Amino acid sequence: MDIQDIINNIAAGENVAAKEGLENVLSAKAFDALQGYKQEIAATLYGGQEQGPEEDTDHEEDEEQEETEQE
């Protein structure tokens, strides 16, 4: 439901439908805002650095162990 539907419901006297539509729109906006804050917090906590390089190091060690075992 969009804003125009809410307005149309108010004009038609369908207050319950208008209220539900308004609650849905506000919930969606609040959810979007929270998603943005989650990304900001994650960037702050991890300093913008991904932890991928640590995983790559472990993978290289596993390959070295496999090569040693095959010999």
Image (spheres, helix red, strand yellow):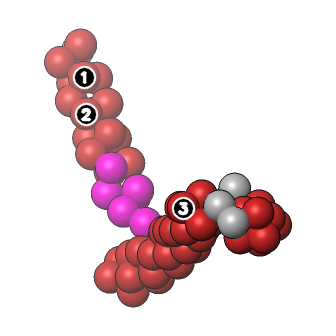
Look at label 3 and name its amino acid: Val
Image coordinates for residue 25, horizontal then vertical, percent: 60, 67
Q: Nearer the viewer, mark 3 or mark 2?
A: 3
On screen, residue 14 versus residue 26, left or right, reads right
- 39 vs 31, nearest the viewer: 31
Look at label 2 and name its amino acid: Asp
- Numbered mark located on residue 6 in the image: none
Residue position marked by numbered label 2 in the rendering? 62
Residue position marked by numbered label 1 in the rendering? 66
- 36 vs 31, nearest the viewer: 31
Instruction: Tell me: residue 56, above or below residue 51.
Output: above
Residue position marked by numbered label 3 in the rendering? 16
On screen, residue 48 versus residue 64, left or right, reads right
Image coordinates for residue 61, horizontal then vertical, percent: 26, 41
Q: Quadrant of residue 16?
A: bottom right
On screen, residue 46 versus residue 12, left or right, reads left
The magenta stretch spans which residues? 49-55
Q: Quadrant of residue 67?
A: top left
| Secondary-structure class at tag 2 | helix
Crowding near pointer 3: few (<14 within 10 Å), some, many (20+)? few
| Residue depicted at 31% across the width and 57% down the height | 54
Look at label 1 and name its amino acid: Glu
3 or 1: tag closer to the N-terminus: 3
Image coordinates for residue 47, horizontal then vertical, percent: 40, 83
